Amino acid sequence: MLSDAGPVRGFRRGRQHIWELEPGRLAKARDYLERIDAQWDVALERLEQFLPDE
């Protein structure tokens, strides 16, 4: 599954399955998740404006 998504690649060497991280693809995934995180922060801040203080 991770190989299909791109952050790792796998290959066989004899009977072994070797997995390697793809740093560029992993960085893209991290950047995407950071953008989503920032969007959630903004959305939650807006929601807080409508909730009464307790």
Image (cartoon, rainbow, N blue to C red):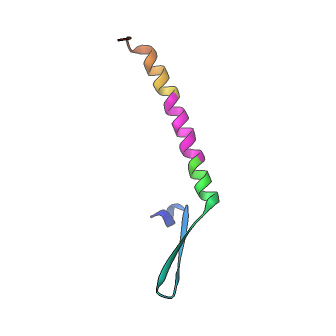
Q: Is residue 36 magenta?
A: yes
Residue 13 percent coordinates (x, y): 53, 84
Which residues are the magenta region?
31-41
- At 61% from the left and 53% from the top, the residue drawn is 27
Q: Extreme bottom residue here? A: 14
Query: Dividing the image into 4 quarters, which one contains the C terminus?
Result: top left
Magenta stretch: dominant secondary structure: helix
> Residue at horizontal 50%, vertical 66%?
3
Q: Is residue 44 left or right of residue 30?
A: left
Name above or below for residue 37 compared with residue 16: above
Could you tell me residue 16's position as x and y percent? 48, 82
Task: Tally the marks.
Answer: 0
Which residue, as the protein is rendered here, is positioned at the far left?
54
Q: Quadrant of the N terminus?
A: bottom left
In this view, 52 is above or below 15: above
Residue at x 56% of width, y 51% of height: 29
Residue 47: quadrant of the picture: top left
- The residue that appears at 49% across and 32% down in the rendered structure is 40
Is residue 16 part of the magenta span, yes or no?
no
Q: Nearer the viewer, residue 46 or 27?
A: 27
Left or right? Give the position of 45 relative to 52. Answer: right
Residue 24 lies, with reference to residue 13, above or below; the image says above
Extreme residue in the right direction: 24
Q: Position of residue 36 (x, y in %)?
A: 52, 39
